[in-house]
Amino acid sequence: MRRQRAVKATLAALVMVAGFLVVAASPSRASVGDDWRMEIPAGSPAARSSLAMVYDEVRKEVVLFGGATSPVGGPLGDTWVWDGAAWSPRTPLTSPPARKGASMVYDKARQRVLLFGGEGIQFRNLNDTWSWTGTTWEQLNTAQGAVTPPTRANASMAYDDARQQVVLHDGLQGSGDAADTWIWDGSTWRQVNTGPGALTPRQRRFASMAYDAARQRTVLFGGSIVGGVAADTWLWDGTGWSQVNTAAGAPTPPGRSGHVMAFAPGGGGRVILFGGIDPDKNDTWEWNGTGWGEQTPATRPSARGGAGMAYDAARQRAVLFGGWNSLLVPMGDTWTYGGSAPPKPLADFDGDARTDISVFRPSTGTWYLRPSAGGPASATDWGTSGDLPVPGDYDGDGKTDLAVFRPSTGTWFLRPSAGGPDSATDWGTSGDLPVPGDYDGDGKADLAVFRPSTGTWFLRPSAGGPDSATAWGTSGDLPVPGDYDGDGNADLAVFRPSTGTWFLRPSAGGPASAADWGASGDIPTPGDYDGDGKADLAVFRPGNGTWYLRPSAAGPASATTWGTNGDMPVPGDYDADGKSDLAVFRPGNGTWYVNGGAATAWGTTGDHPLPLPAAIRQAFFQ
């Protein structure tokens, strides 16, 4: 009772400061359960080092180009793609000249892979710019007199998503190293950070750089410098460089060069660093925005430098290929890194780990999808008047499938995105509320209904286990399933509107719990707002558009005004940082407002914004 009074007092205090975000630094947190796994693909590129590798978000594949058969060997000019199971060669009509030590990123704004520079034949450094369309290569920036960075190899490059530009820094120029910074805006290069006294990382080569989408900063670490190797960490914020992690005793990876880095959205978002040389290393580190933490997976790749690494968002694992070992022998093995997959974003129809803006029109049974990965918008008829939209990943391919529940018959109609046959399954009866979720942890959404009259949950697991009926709740409760204990399974949970109380029944076997968080009239909006892999208690107060969050990661509770009277809450991970974002849909004008993003008109009066959990549907449409 004392704890419940304290929670209520906290909520009351938050009501008094509604509209002001309570901000506190998140504690450093190492990812849990991440591991390295050696893959045995059916096909594979030849062993190599100094290759370029990046993930193509539109085509959902990792692209590999070039490299060399040894650190001093002749360059290669082939193109390969990884689909999560095998490598396949591509035979484009046009390709960049063979090279090693090139820099390559995915330019999301232009939906193209961008390649710059490297070392070509006869040890000649290059400064040409190329774009991969998915089928062929096109050379860019070829106009006479076009500005371009000086020739270089083994430079650091990353795509800054917040500013929609590519950032290039450092690299080997002839007999010396560079320390300049360049920006590519899709059509031209320009040098930046050139003012008197501008702070910049010192000259280097074989450093590594990755864009931290969670913090909207580009992270640079290490590299080969005059006299040895660096162990410094720098951030680029779009206008300038700043050195971080400089406090005495701050954990940091030992100095190195030839290492690889990639950003992964799970666990609140982190930059993964692996390997390097001087001396040879096979350690794994993660940057969480405030500090480095070493990871200790039981299995790991052998020590190497000059490998390639990219984060495969469709498979939610980082992919590592090649490199050279301590004997300068090229390697041709493929590894992936990650843990149990982070929670899949709701309404991610294109599989890019972002919630897509989408609506269901109940009068016609039409789905209007606006994919975040940049593909064409679509309108698909799936359902009829009176059906309820129940999107979910029912086939486990990483994409949300179209699905409706017909209340009059208790029938589910599924249209899988993986291309399997459509299906119709009776599971439920009139008056039941559909509550799909991954209750058995197999990566697929299960059919499930909550019967309000008795507070009973009826689950049909996709993994083939027995059907079940579990009493959890009472008449008037709202179902709010979610992974509150972070074990990868959806837990049974209800919200009692009359008292603002949450009743949780964890699937991991821990004790059931009750927590007061909310008041009469509040709408429950659970989600992983702190990025720790667990659903947090949260409510939206429709009268004043205020969100009240109670994070599971022990951070402070917060109250934030985002929305106005009449808005519908539509939380989701719209930016792929592994955290739920505040967002509302305004029925009066069909506009979406995502915290940190632009307003987007998509929908009209009467449309159901997706996702639409049962508790929110009950508040607005029943």
Image (tube, rainbow, N blue to C red):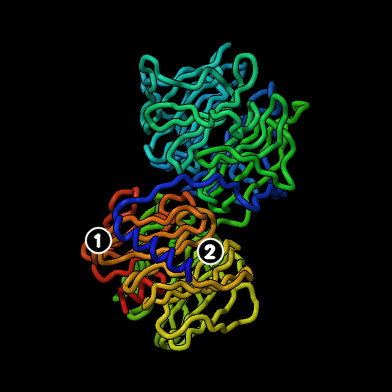
Q: Residue at x 60, y 72 (%)?
A: 511
The residue that label 1 is drawn on is: 564
Identify the residue shown where x is 54% and y is 44%.
Answer: 270
In the visual, does 323 lie left or right of 233?
right
Q: Nearer the viewer, mark 1 or mark 2?
A: 1
Q: Secondary structure at mark 2?
A: loop
Query: Measured from the top left, where is residue 56 in percent x and y?
Result: 50, 44
Instruction: Name the foreground residue: 140 vs 102.
Output: 102
Which residue reaches farthest front? Answer: 2
Residue at disc 1, secondary structure: loop
Dividing the picture into quadrants, the one containing residue 561 is bottom left
Three-letter code, disc 1: Thr
In this view, the residue in front, 340 or 99, is 340
Is 597 located above or below residue 358 in the figure? Answer: above
Residue 374 position, x and y percent, is 39, 50
Amino acid on which disc 2 is placed: Ala
Few, some or many residues within 10 Å of mark 1 (<14, 14–19, 20+):
some
Which residue is rendered at x = 46% and y = 50% of the image?
Answer: 576
Which residue has dot 2 on it?
418
Q: Nearer the viewer, residue 287 or 325?
A: 287
Distance from disc 1 to disc 2, alpha carbons, whole Å, reads 38 Å
